[in-house]
Image: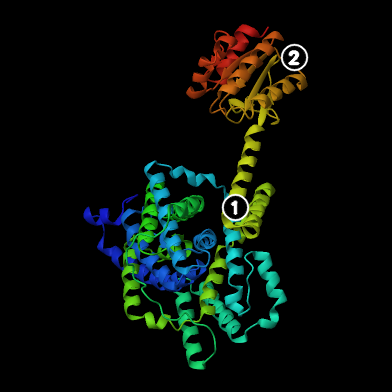
């Protein structure tokens, strides 16, 4: 089984009976996790808990139809919820009905963008976000989530909308602290964290919420509760928005689509690698588009995937997305017969669920790993995190992506270069910094480890001239090792032609070794082969050196 969906497995008779037990257990566990998360993340998006259930109910079966991961847990996710709220709130201008319609429209736009991207086979866009950007982004999201729940956890009025200003208000308004609300929130959070630490496969969030509701009911504590949940089951309708609304939401929708897809594909791939099956990047785009488009018509909001709801089924040895179908069925039963129980849940306890999620997504391990490997990449992650918590999530990601591009361009514009020497015991050519190498009088073998293009074409020639000037020998012939040069653009080809002309004028001849077909095609079309002269292109360095020994070396 590689990238086949659940219906294909059933239709082809490839689903095995022995998988039912583990899939069913995983589905029940996911449903138990999803109940508190759907409620908490919907409120994080500025919507009622019912919207979280509607989005969940359509996402689960639709992904089972189109998705290629056996374990990805789709539905409400805190980072997506925060981004959606930031995009919609200014447009809604305090109108709750308009807010709901705009949220649904935003989900529809995310769905349309990712569906079109999937059809166009643009799955490679997941690679645009580097590891430092992702670590910094997810950590910034975690800190933003953490700060967003200060008011709900403490009862203190917090009206700031940024991480640092929220904590500043908390410090200045501690006299407003509500003891009952804080006690419920802290105790619920502690219960969730203990369950996560010692019994990670049980639904600690649901148990903690149920316990908080019972304690509040029996003790008579005066704390805010969720209250009545109306219309949690989907009722399909087209969002009522204008063309100008659509235009205003296109930018945020594109950012959400990129972030949601990247999160989905990274989570899916990280789980699939250890379990030996494949993820189809383009079909994952289509699956993400389908769940968001369906959520739009069901009165939901933008959704993606949850790492925790993905890892748990894998831990329980779930084999297919039947677990999502079981979770879907369980959730419907719960909403039909257990909705009154949800009304008694304290809002501070729901806030604790979000705070626990925030602690889970702050990537301390990733930050430490980056610091141990590259200070520059660790700094990039830190800048990304800071940009996310001080601006808004989308702008923070755009800043980080721009920095990633700048750093990447800096690296490829100044790549590693070296002079190669022959190592007798290795039957090959390696960097002359290795003590085992020897060089030939009158010959310089020059290696350039990057594609040749406009950003590094001048650097290529500058480095070669510097090596010719600084090398102690009197080199009259240069072999260019093009094994690391995957491609050559027009600007670089023109620079190479000029370089060859200049070196020929100084009585230095040049040949090229180990160029691939793509580079050779440009060498021919640009006239570079003619400038180099006959018999100047060789498949190996040894062949080029052999020609040098026969024809050039005195």
- The location of residue 242, given as percent across then percent down, is 43, 55
Q: Nearer the viewer, mark 2 or mark 1?
A: 1
Q: Which mark is residue 178?
A: none
Q: How many marks?
A: 2
Q: Which mark is residue 395?
A: 1
Q: Which mark is residue 474?
A: 2
Please state if 196 lies on the left or on the right of 329 as rendered: right
Question: In this view, which residue lies farthest toward the bottom?
Answer: 219
* Residue 519 appears in the rendering: yes
In the image, residue 553 sits, relative to residue 20, either above or below, namely above
- The location of residue 371, given as percent across then percent down, is 67, 53
Q: Residue at x 72, y 20 (%)?
A: 465
SS at badge 1: helix
Q: Residue at x 39, y 71 (%)?
A: 29
Question: Which image quadrant for residue 234?
Answer: bottom left
Q: Residues within 10 Å of mark 1 (few under 14, many from 20)?
A: some
Question: Which image quadrant for residue 531?
Answer: top right
């Amino acid at each position: 089984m590689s990238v086949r969906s659940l219906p294909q497995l059933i239709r082809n008779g490839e689903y095995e009976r022995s998988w039912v037990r583990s899939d069913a257990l995983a589905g029940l566990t996911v449903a138990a996790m999803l109940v508190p998360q759907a409620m908490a993340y919907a409120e994080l998006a500025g919507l009622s808990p019912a919207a979280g259930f509607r989005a969940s109910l359509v996402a689960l079966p639709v992904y089972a139809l189109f998705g290629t991961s056996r374990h990805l847990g789709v539905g409400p996710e805190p980072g997506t919820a925060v981004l959606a709220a930031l995009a919609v709130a200014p447009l809604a201008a305090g109108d709750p009905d308009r807010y709901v319609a705009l949220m649904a429209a935003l989900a529809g736009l995310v769905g349309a963008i990712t569906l079109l991207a999937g059809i166009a086979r643009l799955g490679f866009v997941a690679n645009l976000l580097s590891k430092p950007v992702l670590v910094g982004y997810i950590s910034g999201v975690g800190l933003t989530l953490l700060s967003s729940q200060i008011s709900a956890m403490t009862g203190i009025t917090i009206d700031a909308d940024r991480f640092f200003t929220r904590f500043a208000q908390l410090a200045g308004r501690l006299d407003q602290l509500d003891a009952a609300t804080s006690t419920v929130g802290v105790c619920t959070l502690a219960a969730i964290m203990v369950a996560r630490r010692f019994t990670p496969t049980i639904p600690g969030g649901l148990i903690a919420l149920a316990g908080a509701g019972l304690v509040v009911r029996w003790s008579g504590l005066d704390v805010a509760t969720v209250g009545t949940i109306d219309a949690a089951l989907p009722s399909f309708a087209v969002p009522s928005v204008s063309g100008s609304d659509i235009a205003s939401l296109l930018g945020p929708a594109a950012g959400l689509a990129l972030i949601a897809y990247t999160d989905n594909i990274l989570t899916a791939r990280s789980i699939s690698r250890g379990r030996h099956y494949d993820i189809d990047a383009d079909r994952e785009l289509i699956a993400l588009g389908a769940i968001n488009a369906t959520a739009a018509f069901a009165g939901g909001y933008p959704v993606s995937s949850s790492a925790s709801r993905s890892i748990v089924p894998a831990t329980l040895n779930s084999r297919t997305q039947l677990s999502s179908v079981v979770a879907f069925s369980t959730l419907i039963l719960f909403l039909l017969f257990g909705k009154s129980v949800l009304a008694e849940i304290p809002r501070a306890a729901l806030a604790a669920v979000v705070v626990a999620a925030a602690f889970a997504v702050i990537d301390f391990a990733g930050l430490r790993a980056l610091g141990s490997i590259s200070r520059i990449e660790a700094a990039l992650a830190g800048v990304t995190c800071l940009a996310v918590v001080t601006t808004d999530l989308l702008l923070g990601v755009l800043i980080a992506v721009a920095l990633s591009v700048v750093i990447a361009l800096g690296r490829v514009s100044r790549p590693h270069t070296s002079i190669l020497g022959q190592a007798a015991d290795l039957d090959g050519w390696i960097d002359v910094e290795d003590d085992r190498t020897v060089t030939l009088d009158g010959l310089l073998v020059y290696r350039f480890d990057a594609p040749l293009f406009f950003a590094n074409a001048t650097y290529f020639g500058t480095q070669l001239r510097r090596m010719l000037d600084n090398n102690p020998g009197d080199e009259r012939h240069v072999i260019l090792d093009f094994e690391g040069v995957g491609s050559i653009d027009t600007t670089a080809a023109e620079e190479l032609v000029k370089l060859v002309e200049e070196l020929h004028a100084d009585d230095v001849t040049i040949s090229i070794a180990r160029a691939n077909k793509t580079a050779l095609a440009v060498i021919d079309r640009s006239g570079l082969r003619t400038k180099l002269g006959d018999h100047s292109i060789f498949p190996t360095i040894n062949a080029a050196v052999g020609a040098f020994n026969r024809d050039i070396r005195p």
